[in-house]
Image (tube, rainbow, N blue to C red):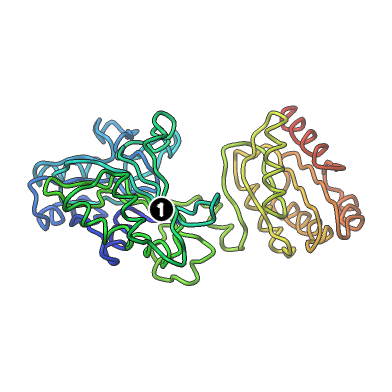
Amino acid sequence: MNIHEYQAKALLKGFGAPVAAGVPVFSAGEAEAAARSLPGPLWVVKSQIHAGGRGKGRFKEASAGEKGGVRLARSVDEVIEFARQMLGATLVTKQTGQAGKQVNRLYIEDGADIARELYCSLLVDRAVGRVAFVVSTEGGMDIETVAHDTPEKIVTVAIDPEAGVTAADVAAIVSALKLEGAAAKDAETLFPLLYWAFIDKDMSLLEVNPLIVLKDGHLRLLDAKVSFDGNALFRHPDVEALRDLTEEDDKEIEAHKHDLAYVALSGNIGCMVNGAGLAMATMDIIKLYGAEPANFLDVGGGASREKVTAAFKIITADPAVKGILINIFGGIMKCDVIAEGVIAAVREVGLQVPLVVRLEGTNVALGKKIIADSGLDVIAADDLDDAARKIVAAVKGA
């Protein structure tokens, strides 16, 4: 689960992280009061959407002006004008795709005197099985660009979970970021507290880009991006309360209600599979035969008929889907349950696109018989390769 920048900063401030004063606003009318509550004379007006690259983004509407989604204002009147232009407009960045995202809220923040911009993130390093700091002196840039062009400028420091962030870990980070004086002193407090926030709130990503050194020598989080492990949200009702459903795909929201693992993608072949590994293999083989999956959807190992029906409805609700591939290997999951769920869903919502079904495993004969006797226009497949070939051919033929 993702949250907005202003929410991330408020959360991290609660752990003691240094952030600038700021006020979230939801209408242009709130912008003036927000600006006047801050010291000035420089304000930053930031679009709040769940996507990176806001500063370099562009708005679709001409009325939103030519500047990006993060703007510097040098007067209260300019803050108000920017707020009027940006709220309700559609911001397009590298991460939103061409559809962009509508800006429904802004963050008005006090300006900063910046001496240096650095990069800092925490994530789970699966290579070593530990949470790790990833830091670079090249802050403010896309970390992917830094990794490609100057990988030697990225330093990873893995943290021993039993010891936590030690003095040696802090020294390694300070050295990598070339911190001195007050900034090096601030690091002794900042990096341990960022690690503790990551662990305590079950984060999957904590990214500060840029982490800045102010002209007075101290550190400050100028931006903050936080993602949480969705499987741990039951432990954090305060975090779940921060969820902004307007930033999420409607199909993913519906899938969450039925405890389905669903991620919308950009292709045109809808997939329903049981098991994450098999789902990944299914998407791979669709791509192998020249098509693109429209989603990742794992119904789980023991899905009910109702859950399968809900999954099928979610797939067919996507107008981009031109064909559906159901690939089930029944262990705990029974093929007859899948068959009954699919038939129930088809009879309720109809079938407007080609449907290929591959069943194998527990009660496979019964599952195939249920589908065969249903009278539905379903294309049967013998194995995964056969299924992928048939759905790609059917979609391209259509």
What is the x, y in percent for residue 287?
Answer: 67, 33
Residue 113 in sight: yes
What is the x, y in percent for residue 20?
Answer: 19, 55
Give whichever of 75, 202 is nearer the camera. 202
What is the x, y in percent for residue 269?
Answer: 67, 39
Is 365 left or right of 174, judged from the image as shown? Answer: right
Q: Element type at marker 1? A: strand
Give whichever of 168, 174 is nearer the camera. 168
Q: Residue at x 28, y 31 (%)?
A: 62
Is 66 left or right of 305, judged from the image as shown? Answer: left
Q: For mark 1, does the 10 Å Cα neighbourhood hold few (<14), some (14 to 19), or many (20 or more) residues?
A: many
Vertical order, 306 against 73 (above or below): below
Give whichever of 288, 309 is nearer the camera. 288
Question: Which quadrant is the C terminus positioned in?
Answer: top right
Vertical order, 196 against 52 (above or below): below
Is 390 left or right of 170, judged from the image as shown? Answer: right
Residue 92 in sight: no
Residue 71, image quadrant: top left
Q: Residue at x 44, y 70 (%)?
A: 236
Q: Which residue is mark 1?
A: 122
Q: Residue at x 82, y 46 (%)?
A: 358
Q: Residue at x 29, y 44 (%)?
A: 177
Is 172 left or right of 361, judged from the image as shown? Answer: left
